[in-house]
Image (spheres, coloured by chain):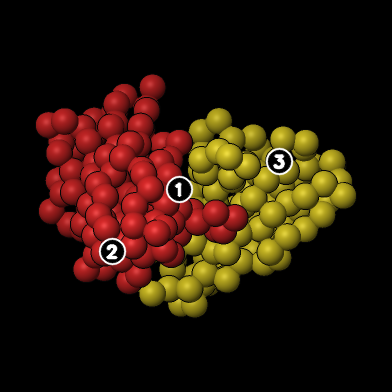
């Protein structure tokens, strides 16, 4: 059974940093692209970042480029999102999601999310 | 970035109704589009990928169609468990982009 478990969400002040983790199990982690998707309170879904199975290719939404870094440790089956220079508008539930293939953007499994609150 | 325009933003329907939701891409995306269902407090769930392929375990009353710039999600005979918010997602090119969502409510 595929499982994705996010952690690391917290209350942080504007300008602060946070690292999210997503522990994966139930599939061959290195064979699948992974993405982070966020949802601000009462709003729609917003794709944040994606990474290929090997980690050699990464992509970002314009709104987070230069501030967020996606990475993965295939030996630990874990996905990360390092977030710097956080803004109030980054407040959201952050979901990790599994791609169906090595560099696929079709997201077939999702975690339950971790809440990031940026506020003073 | 490719913009996805989804309509309507909300609709009211009754159990048994046929419901149609559309997404329009700002440029051609072949058939690289998925549809997702999200219920309150829950993570999104993949319903359709490749514009028209039904994800395993999804009821056959859901169907997707379209290619290029115009896409449709159809729910035939709406069931009580289908009241939710639906999103399209283009995976033709990065950055991936979602439509704004369609909330399907009970009439």
Q: Which of marks 1 and 3 is in front?
A: 1
Q: Residue at (71%, 65%) from the top-left corner?
A: B8
Residue B104 seen in the current view: yes
- Determine crowd level at label 3: few under 14, some 14-19, many 20+ residues with C-alpha closer than 10 A: some
Report helix, strand or loop for mark 1: strand
Q: Which chain is red?
A: A
Q: Colour of chain B?
A: yellow
Element class at badge 3:
helix
Mark 3 — residue?
Answer: B82
Inter-mark Cα distance, 2 to 1: 18 Å
Residues marked 3 and 2 touching at CB (< 8 Å): no
Q: Residues within 10 Å of mark 1 (few under 14, many from 20)?
A: some
Q: Distance between the residues labelled 1 and 3?
A: 23 Å
Q: Where residue B82 sits in the image (x, y, percent)?
A: 71, 40
Query: For residue A89, what is the image quadrant?
Result: bottom left
- What residue does disc 2 label? A15
- The kind of secondary structure element at disc 2 is loop
| Residue position marked by numbered label 1 in the rendering | A93
Name the residue rendered at 26%, 68% in the picture. Answer: A65
Q: How many labels does the image show?
A: 3
Decide if residue B9 is on the left or right side of residue B35: right
Residue at mark 2 shares a chain with residue at mark 1: yes
Dot 2 or dot 1: first in sequence order is 2
In the figure, is residue B45 to the left or right of A90? right
Q: What subunit carries mark 1?
A: A
* Image quadrant in which the N terminus of chain A is located: top left
Q: Mark 3 lies on which chain?
A: B
Dots 3 and 2 on the same chain: no
């Amino acid at each position: 059974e595929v499982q994705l478990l996010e952690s690391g969400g917290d209350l942080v002040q504007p300008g602060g940093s946070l690292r999210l983790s997503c522990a994966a199990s139930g599939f061959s982690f290195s064979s699948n692209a992974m993405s982070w998707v966020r949802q601000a309170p009462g709003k729609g879904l917003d794709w944040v970042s994606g990474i290929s199975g090997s980690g050699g290719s990464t992509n970002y939404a314009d709104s987070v480029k230069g501030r967020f870094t996606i990475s993965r440790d295939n030996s630990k089956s874990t996905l990360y999102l390092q977030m710097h220079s956080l803004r109030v508008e980054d407040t959201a539930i952050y979901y990790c999601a599994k791609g169906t293939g090595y560099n696929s953007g079709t997201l077939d499994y999702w975690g339950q999310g971790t809440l990031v609150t940026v506020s003073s | 970035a490719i913009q996805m325009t989804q309509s309507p933003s909300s609709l009211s329907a009754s159990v048994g109704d046929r419901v149609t939701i559309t997404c329009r891409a700002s440029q051609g995306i072949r058939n690289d589009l998925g549809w997702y269902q999200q219920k309150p407090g829950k993570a999104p769930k993949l319903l359709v990928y490749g514009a028209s392929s039904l994800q395993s375990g999804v009821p056959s009353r859901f169907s997707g169609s379209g290619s290029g710039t115009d896409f449709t999600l159809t729910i035939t005979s709406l069931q009580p468990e289908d009241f939710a918010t639906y999103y399209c997602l283009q995976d033709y090119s990065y950055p991936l982009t979602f439509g704004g969502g369609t909330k399907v409510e009970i009439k």
